[in-house]
Amino acid sequence: MIIIMEPGATLEEQQAVIARLEREGFKVHLSRGVERTIIGAIGDKTRLKSETLAALPGVEKVVPILQPYKLAGRDFHPEDTVVPVGDLTVGGRQVHIIAGPCAVESREQLLETAMAVREAGATMLRGGAYKPRSSPYSFQGLAAKGLEFLAEARELTGLPVVTEIMDPALVTAVAQVADVLQIGSRNMQNFALLQAVGRTQKPVLLKRGLSATIEEWLLAAEYILTEGNSQVILCERGIRTFETYTRNTLDLSAVPAVKHLSHLPVIVDPSHGTGRKFMVAPMARAALAAGADGLMIEVHPNPQEALSDGPQSLTPEQFARLVQEIRPIIAAGERELGHLVS
Ligand code: PEP
Ligand code: MN
């Protein structure tokens, strides 16, 4: 349930409500808004009647949370969440572009791409060191060596690193290098992995499962939030439909839907969403027009030679053009393209 405090409620009154809830075994989440404080309480409703809580000093009203995703939903947290990534913020006025290769293939490939995307306007670097591949015979990523190159690329460019984690046992190793832990589409319902990243204090980029409904996606976010990590960024990356022309069907209607239901920031990945490079820029523009908080774009210095996802990867020049094309759309939405502080 949600306990809405009166606008003038004192800190003591808030603390008394929290103490009472905790005494009855409730998990408490505090949301201090500009106007008033909202206390979210998850637990056994039979232990404490809402009328009892409503009678406590400073309480305006007590309402049940109807959304199944209690912490990810707007019922409990009406204001947008802004996720800090180093000096950057995702989900506020600024729009951020995460760019880089599908996979880290070599030191040279990564450093060249990192410098080029930074120059073009990207504010975060992506690149998989551990790759989830449909076939066990495909390139699986450089693993620890890939993490090393990512750390070097960050050192060189100042770009925060976004990289995928597939195994709960690797959380510590990946979190040492990653500024944002990416949960891939195939692992959206790997609940042990979600809980493991939920126990870190690193921002998490949670990609939508290939066949996940919006509710399942938000419930996956809930697994991370219930562990105490509130820094979740959602990423729409296309879903499986009957259409085969595109690799996936990029569900841009999910952007306003998720923004309506949840306070979490949402970005869009038109690279995996379409699988075709000529569609990446138009869908990037559409995503921002639909209200996305950012983009994730695959860029490779030589897409024909890429070890994974070449057909959807842009060259650095094509990426630079995309960044120019999205500027007027960002401005029209009264937002601005994010930039690195240094
Ligand atoms: C990726 O970002 O490289 C990736 C594997 O994406 P997804 O999990 O969306 O397929
Ligand atoms: Mn990829």
Image: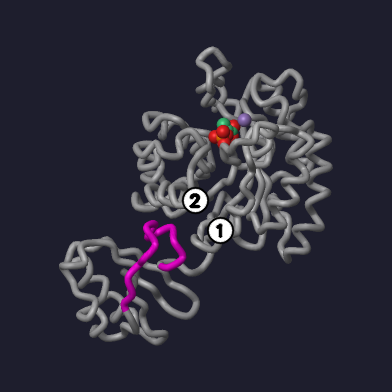
Q: Are marks 1 and 2 in contact (CB under 8 Å)?
A: yes
- Residue on which disc 2 sits: 214
Q: Is residue 174 left or right of residue 325?
A: left
Asked if residue 67 is positioned above or below residue 153 in the image, the reply reads below
**What residue do we see at 39% from left, 87% from top?**
8
Find out whether residue 128 is within the magenta segment. Answer: no
Q: Is residue 299 above or below residue 286?
A: above
Specify the amino acid type for callout 2.
Ile
* Span colored in magenta: 62-75
Give the residue drawn at x 15%, y 68%: 47
Which residue is drawn at the image coordinates 70% and 32% (left, top)?
A: 245
- Element under label 2? helix
Report the image quarter containing ligand 1.
Answer: top right
User: Does 71 lie within the magenta span?
Assistant: yes
Comparing 290 with 211, the one in front is 211
Indicate the position of residue 172 as horizontal and vertical percent values.
41, 34
Q: In which quarter of the image is residue 30?
A: bottom left
**Which image quarter is the N terminus in?**
bottom left
Q: In the depicted view, which residue is nearer to us: 104 or 210?
A: 210
Q: Residue 207 or 257: which is nearer the viewer?
A: 257
Mark-to-mark CA distance, 1 and 2: 8 Å
Residue 132 at what x, y percent from top left? 52, 26
- Where does label 1 land, which residue? 257
Q: Is mark 2 within 8 Å of ligand 1?
A: no
Residue found 31% across the figure and 85% down from its top: 58
Hey, what amino acid is under mark 1?
A: Ala
Please report whichever mark, 1 or 2, sits nearer to the chain's N-terminal start.
Answer: 2
